[in-house]
């Protein structure tokens, strides 16, 4: 009963967040509604281009409690994807030849069937790109996770890991005390088995999230700076850095409201609207699967309980490729975060 109450409470939180975004968004900026902004550049209603990526949330349980987390993940979360739902995902991946499976959480590795699922995806087709969004510290959280770097290598998994900055103060302030030192140790472990090492073919990408109410700097400049500093200070190498804008939902929305930065931040997002970024938003080639199998246009809509706008086809067990490929993508005010400046997606910037 406690778990059910918690789920009901979080559903109410999602509805509240949507109401706040609609009611509190500054009205002094021309074309304030995101839908209107899309309409001005011929993109409304927003439609998929093709379905290439299945992003699957394996659960909201995590060993960290990060201040900016849009999933509101943490050790107290009990939502975990079942093997039955994973099997339904495998059916879709195989039947519709999905060429990229992006595994996220929480800490996806904390799902007890994580390794079984990765191995099952790999058996379908060696050419499928499997991405795991690893928070790094999970590798050191328990002895049973210490062989994760070798497991990733064995199954040719692309690792994407958050590292807010190359210094302890900024990283720990966002992700928790001691996270930076553990992240550095985990990165070294990944490097040791070949991840991020030139010529190895094992991809290690890092993710930068701004630590406050501002947009991320140039992704290219950040990547060059991170590569230089991490190599010099710790001997760490990696492939690419993704700069991701913090969307005004969940914990980051709480921070904006508590700190009095909400209006200013929304004005920044709206004022930096980029039509090219809007054209390349990730929801146009991605379907997001929640831990319970329900379908969403993106990971952010998932956290706001905004299921795909296709009645009768809202669960992985009801997958209809044609209907999903022709749906109208659900948009609200939080979507300004993906279209500001250089754009933002789970793969970083989307526009020059």
Image (tube, grey):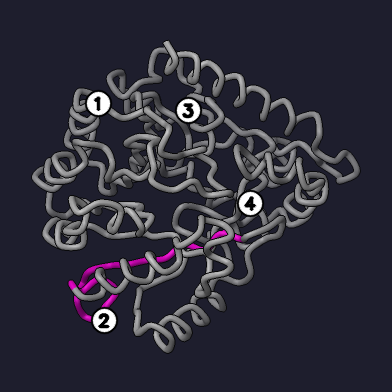
Residue 55, compared with residue 200, is above or below; it is: above
Secondary structure under the numbered disc 3 in the rendered image:
loop
Magenta segment includes 201:
yes
Mark 2 closeness class: few <14, some 14–19, many ≥20 residues within 10 Å: few
Q: What residue does disc 1 label? A: 82
Expressed as whole percent of the image width and height from the top left, the position of residue 36 reads 74, 37
User: For the residues carrying marks 1 and 4, which lies nearer the camera in this image?
Assistant: 1
Q: Considering only order in the chain, which callout, 2 or 4, is on the residue closer to the N terminus?
A: 2
User: For the residues carrying marks 4 and 2, which lies nearer the camera in this image?
Assistant: 2
Q: Considering only order in the chain, which callout, 4 or 1, is on the residue closer to the N terminus?
A: 1
Name the foreground residue: 269 vs 236.
236
Secondary structure under the numbered disc 4 in the rendered image:
loop
* Residue stretch in magenta: 193-210
Residue found at the very far right of the displayed protein: 28
Residue 193, compared with residue 281, is above or below; it is: below
Q: What residue does disc 4 label? A: 339
Q: CA distance from mark 2 to mark 3?
A: 41 Å
Mark 3 closeness class: few <14, some 14–19, many ≥20 residues within 10 Å: some
Q: Considering only order in the chain, which callout, 3 or 2, is on the residue closer to the N terminus?
A: 2
Q: CA distance from mark 1 to mark 4?
A: 34 Å
Q: Main secondary structure of the magenta part?
A: loop
């Amino acid at each position: 009963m406690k778990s059910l109450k918690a789920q009901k409470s979080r559903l109410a939180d999602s509805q509240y967040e949507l109401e706040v975004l609609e009611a509190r968004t500054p009205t002094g900026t021309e074309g304030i509604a995101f839908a209107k902004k899309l309409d001005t550049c011929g993109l409304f209603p927003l439609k998929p281009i093709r379905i290439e990526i299945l992003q699957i949330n394996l659960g909201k349980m995590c060993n960290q409690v990060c201040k900016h987390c849009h999933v509101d993940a943490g050790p107290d979360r009990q939502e975990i994807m079942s093997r039955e739902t994973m099997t339904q995902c495998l059916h879709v991946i195989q039947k519709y030849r999905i060429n990229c499976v992006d595994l996220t959480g929480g800490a996806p590795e904390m799902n007890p069937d994580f390794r079984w699922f990765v191995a099952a995806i790999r058996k379908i087709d060696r050419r499928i790109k499997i991405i795991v969004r690893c928070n790094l510290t999970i590798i050191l959280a328990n002895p049973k996770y210490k062989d994760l770097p070798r497991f990733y290598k064995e199954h040719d998994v692309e690792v994407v890991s958050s590292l807010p900055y190359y210094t302890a103060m900024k990283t720990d302030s966002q992700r928790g005390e001691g996270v930076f030192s553990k992240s550095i140790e985990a990165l070294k472990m990944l490097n040791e088995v070949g991840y991020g090492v030139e010529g190895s073919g094992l991809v290690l990408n890092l993710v930068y999230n701004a630590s406050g109410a501002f947009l991320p700097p140039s992704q290219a400049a950040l990547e060059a700076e991170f590569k230089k500093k991490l190599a010099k200070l710790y001997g760490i190498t990696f492939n690419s850095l993704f700069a991701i804008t913090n969307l005004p939902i969940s914990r980051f929305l709480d921070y904006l409201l508590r700190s009095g930065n909400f209006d200013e931040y929304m004005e920044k997002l709206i004022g930096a609207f980029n039509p090219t970024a809007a054209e390349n938003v990730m929801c146009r080639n991605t379907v997001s699967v929640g831990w319970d199998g329900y379908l969403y246009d993106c990971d952010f809509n998932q956290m706001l309980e905004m299921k795909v706008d296709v009645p009768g086809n809202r669960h992985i067990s009801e997958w209809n490729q044609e209907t999903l490929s022709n749906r109208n993508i659900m948009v609200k005010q939080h979507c300004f975060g993906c279209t500001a400046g250089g754009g933002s997606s789970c793969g970083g910037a989307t526009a020059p």
